[in-house]
Image: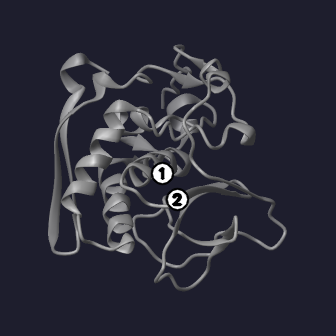
Amino acid sequence: MNTETRRRTVSCRCGKRIYTVTDIDLGRSQYLGLYPSEMSVRFLSYYSTVDDYAIRDIGWQLKDKLKGKGDRKKAAVALSMVMQNTEYATDESRFGKDLWELPVLSLGDGKADCDGRTGLFVALAYNMGLDVITVISGNHMFPAVNLDDGNGRYYEFENRRYYPLETAEHSIKDQKYSDPGDFIHMARPEMPTEKFKRTLSNSRPNTVRL
């Protein structure tokens, strides 16, 4: 990513309103230029890098703009921000292999698949004060949010109900998130540990040339 492209404004439309976040400096991210060297469910709480200075700033600005709004609205705005600022692209087309990329890469490249979008959403939602988790079901990753007024399908985690949001498609709609035989992993976002940080590499995976 060129230095000139690191500072930016991001916006999204949610309902009748446009939400704009200004002066985001991706160069402030302590994770800029780092890539996971392994993908493991034992680190699932950390891939969203909720302590990322640049992504945290976006979440804080959105939280301020949504004062007095319910968690459902906050989740909808966070999802709109992710979906409207990242084009869906498979990791295989970008890196030649699956990669649970960090949020700053998803936003910086403007491209991500379900896990990249999930990590970005979780990072934003966490910093907006939402109770959010990451879910892996089969080969799919998506976020789920604890909502007092939630309805429909939910996942139970630590005695709370979390309602899933789809990050692979460009709409919020009920989908079959898992088959009965799928093994499910769920994790609450946490501050990345030093052990996790040691798995990060500054070597970008080779890009596939189409």
Q: Are marks 1 and 2 in contact (CB under 8 Å)?
A: yes
Image position, residue 115 (x, y; %): 55, 47
- Give the residue displayed 66% in from the left and 43% down from the top: 44
- Give the residue displayed 46% in from the left and 40% down from the top: 50
Q: Which mark is residue 77?
A: none
**In the rendered view, does 21 fall on the left or right side of 152?**
left
- Give the residue displayed 62% in from the left and 22% down from the top: 194
Picture layout, residue 114 above or below residue 155: above
Residue type highlighted by circle 1: Val
Residues under labels 1 and 2: Cα distance? 6 Å
Name the residue beneath numbered marker 2.
132
Image position, residue 169 (x, y; %): 46, 63
Q: Secondary structure at mark 1?
A: helix
Picture layout, residue 174 above or below residue 108: below
Picture layout, residue 52 above or below residue 73: above
Q: Secondary structure at mark 2?
A: strand
**In the rendered view, does 179 fall on the left or right side of 170?**
right
**In the rendered view, does 63 fall on the left or right side of 95?**
left
Picture layout, residue 140 above or below residue 179: above
Name the residue beneath numbered marker 1.
122
- Give the residue displayed 68% in from the left and 23% down from the top: 195
Who comes first in sequence, dot 1 or dot 2? 1
Label 1 Cα crowd, 10 Å radius (few <14 / some 14-19 / many 20+)? many
Residue nearest the viewer, comparing 41 with 99? 41
Q: How is the image coloured?
A: one colour
